[in-house]
Image: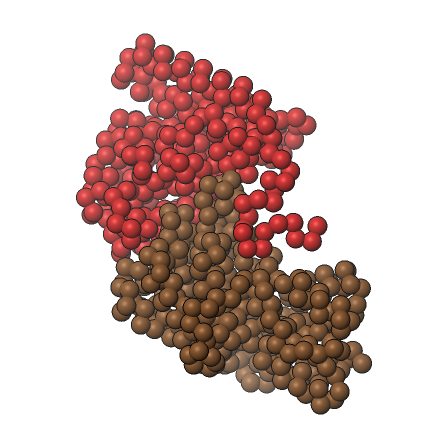
Amino acid sequence: MVRMSYAQAACAAVERAMRADSRVVVLGEDVGRGGIFGQYRGLQQQFGAARVIDTPISEATIMGAAVGMALAGLVPVVEMRVVDFALCAMDEIVNQAAKARYMFGGQARVGLVARMPTGLWSGSAAQHSQSLEAWFAHVPGLVVVAPSTPEDNYGLLSAAIACGDPVIYMEHKELWGLEGDVAPGATVRLGRAKVLRAGSDLTLVTWSRTVHAALEAAELARARGIGVEVIDLRTLWPWDRDTVFGSCARTGRLLVAHEAVRPGGFGGEIAAEVAEVLGIRVKRVGSPRVPVGYSRPLEDEARVGAERILAAIQGFH
Amino acid sequence: MARIRAFENAAEEASRGGVSAFGAALAADVRVRGPLHLSTGQEAVAAGVCANLAPADLITSTHRGHGHTIAKGASIERMMCELFGRASGTNRGKGGSMHIADFSVGMLGANGVVAAGIPIAVGAAHAVRIRGGGEVVACFFGDGAVNRGPFLEGLNWAAIHRLPVLFVCEDNRWSATTPTAAMTAGEGALARARAIGVDGLVVDGNDVFAVDAAAGELLARVRAGDGPRFLHAITYRFKGHVSVDPATYRDGEEVARAIENDPLPLAAARIGAAQAKRILEEAEAEVRRALEIAAAAPWPAPEAAYTDIQDTGAGRWFG
């Protein structure tokens, strides 16, 4: 095991993939200098500017060129800087990357990883703080991943680069410095959730940074005599139905917590599936349907922290 | 050119009643469904450019892409099967006219979104560069595409990386039902390209010999590693935006003048009437056979709706 930050773990995963497979390339704004979060640090020095490609501020063409590269046999790791900017490349993601394999009758695949850091970024206001995972999970053809720890960032990014499908890879904008132990070479299978904490009273499904708030809330709930089973979904599409249903069948209650706006959030999909199949009580916690404000008191309204999750847990009783 | 013309004519006939738009009603039993964008009248651009491409070279195309696909070497029979929605089509019935593709001949796909093929072509050329290959990419788009952002982004990208791309603006003067000139400021497509540092030529897009010569000259520079070049080929869309569009918004004289400048008789005058007649008859016979084969070809199984989407997370999720 090696102690690494979330950013270093990502960097190590890309480095390993590039070393093992000459088809793997990186492209995006500022990647040559290591990326704005340091998640590409040292890669251009190591692999050269031809494989770690600095690009113009042209999100549509960064993504569109990556589709063309993939169709021509490369495996691009695409940097979108933040998910908010990936909106400039929605045609290329939704109409091109996600559809090409199907539309062309399987003549080619679009194996690429589109990294788009997600979530509330303190003090950065409405255009740099969104959580839009539900948009992408809604699109057939895409895989959607949201790691919460350095270990998972290493393992899931490795799996995403190897998987051959277009993967929307959502690291959290405020987890880059988080440290943890990483086993070099260990991949994490896509589509598999992780049970982080056992509990018998309630299943709490979450992902990305909200995992950490959920663990905090589960600890507070324990002090109040409520046993919460915390599941880090890790992959949103395909989400791990077996693990979630197995836990819900035991606990009889489901809470889904995420940083995204609650109406239309992906929590609704999970809650609806569980309610339809198991007929148990379900709840969701998410941000209110407001843009993230700049000023601290406004920003705090959009935060989904342990207190809100705890309140929802207690709401079942 | 003759094969493209024969294909477009047959596809047009088979698509009558295929889509409810432009006042046309949907017919109950139609062989080619949905909007069909015909390149009738524009054949010289596809033929003249692709005559300069090797099998390993690549192209991207547009929603009006049958001509480019045929000119790059795709099978007319398999293309017609695709238009008929059959399992034996180039795309196994999953794409139809607007997404027609044949990777076996380097045709990386038509595209339902205007200008969307430009970044894809640029990326394919970038991949060629990274892999050290000698292929070039011809990127076809229409005059309407020069008003979309990916035009600027893609040309700039190709220029800064000196990628092996020939950009081909197939200018048929109409952006759907709107004259492109009324919607486009400045001095035209080539002037925009030059402003980004991509030089090129303007050519009569109805003269296949002129297109061939201009494309050949530009592709020689591209193949020599001089970076991208731009061909502005001026032609005319004989038909409406889609096959059911009667295009009554156009001036009759403008259309009549354009038809006088039909690329096929122009080419026939160069090669001789007898040879032209033979080529046309062969093309029509080939298309007739394709129609028969397509009409008898098997449909895709409904289960095919669930394949070739993705490997991770594939299948009939939740019913």
Q: Nearer the viewer, residue A155 or B89?
A: A155
Q: Is residue B14 left or right of residue B51?
A: right
The residue at the point 63 percent across, 40 percent down is B303
- Visible residue check, residue A85: no
Point out the residue furthest to the bottom here.
A223
Name the residue: 70% across, 50% down: B319
Q: Quadrant of the N terminus of chain B?
A: top left
- In the image, which lettered chain appears red? B
- State whether residue A110 appears in this view: yes
Residue A183: quarter of image: bottom left
**Residue at 80% in and 81% down:** A317
Numbered circles on residues, count: 0
Depth check, front residue: A203 or A65: A203
Q: Is residue B64 above or below residue A232?
A: above
Q: Which residue is at the far top? A: B274
* Visual colour scheme: by chain
Measuring from the top left, give residue B5's x and y in whole percent: 42, 23
- Up-down: is A110 above or below B253? below
Find residue A222 and report its image quarter: bottom right
Instruction: Decide: is A175 above or below B99.
Output: below
Spot occupied by residue A125 in the image (x, y as percentages of width and height) = 52, 76
Q: Position of residue B19 (x, y in %)?
A: 61, 33
Q: Residue at x 48, y 71 (%)?
A: A153
Residue B214 drawn above or below residue B185: above
Q: Hue of chain A? A: brown
Camera-side residue: A99 or B16? A99
Left or right: B200 as drawn, with respect to A293: left
* x then y, percent, for residue B116: 43, 47
